[in-house]
Amino acid sequence: MTHHNELFDLSGRVAIVTGSTKGIGRAMAEGLARAGATVVISSRKQELCDTVAAEVASATGSTAVGIACHVGQWDAVPSFIDEVIDRCGRIDVLVNNAGINPGRFSPSTMTLEYWRKVFAVNIEGPLRTSQLTAPIMRSQGGGSIVNIASMAAYSGGPDICAYGSSKAALVNLSKSMSQEWASWGIRVNVLAPGPFQSEMTEGAERMQPGFKDMIANGTYMKRVADPQEIVGPVVYLASDASSYVTGDEIAVCGGMHK
């Protein structure tokens, strides 16, 4: 192995990816596994976590463990982190990817129930998992937290106001975390994806024909990304290749204005 490749090597490290049974979450988990990490596959349904973990292990040759958790439930997270430690022994990388954007409410039609549901998953989830993981990483000498935001954090939009607001909050929270935990050897960074191929984009296309062309046209590259295109950036942030990078945001968006 060349020295260059060693920078990106995650052998012997344990990486949690929340929301990793589909879409970019699954792509990131598989990419981290290919880089040598033991990965924790997590979403709300245990059976699905187990199935995807088996598939990722088979595809990569790395260990993959399925542990379900609803990160939007504050009190569900401690037992999840405990189980990761029980089964994997350590946590080196935390990718806070689980997120929801299930409805179309504008600022004028927003309900408190919907607003709180989005914020529970998209901002309280990453806060809770990070604050429980940070002391573990500190005791090991450091680690890397990668929070998955969205280009919607910068642009907003009436139909995605709760989603965009929660992701903007996540960008800001990440900066606060990076400042507090730098002395613990913990780096905290953000990936802000633009339009990616997913069940969400397929569903939107069915409801609103032409949706995919519209979001593609919002990028310089005029296309929607394949989930594999998030892998390089997350492996970079998870690994020693980004050892002097913290408190930063990388847009993976084919060119879009922040």
Image (cartoon, rainbow, N blue to C red):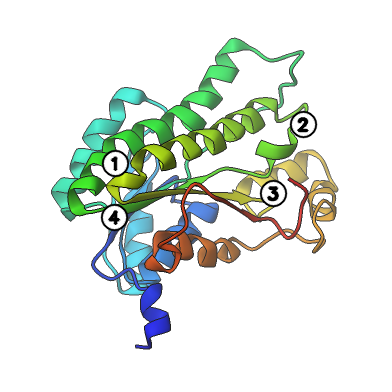
- Number of residues whose C-alpha sits closer than 10 Å to that of mark 2, classed few (under 14), some (14–19) or many (20 or more): some
Quarter of the image with the N terminus in it: bottom left
162 shown above or below 32: above
Disc 2 is placed on an element classified as loop
Of marks 4 and 2, the one in the foreground: 4
Residue 225 seen in render: yes
User: Residue 125: x and y, percent?
Assistant: 42, 32
Q: Considering only order in the chain, which callout, 1 or 4, is on the residue closer to the N terminus?
A: 4
**Does dot 4 land on a helix, a strand or a loop?**
loop
**Numbered circles on residues, count:** 4
State the residue in front, 138 or 209: 138
> What is the C-alpha distance between the residues marked 4 and 3?
34 Å
- Please rate how many residues cluster around mark 4, counting C-alpha atoms within 10 Å: few if below 14, some from 14 to 19, many from 20: many
Q: Residue 202 carries which label?
A: 3
Circle 1 residue: 134
Label 3 amino acid?
Glu
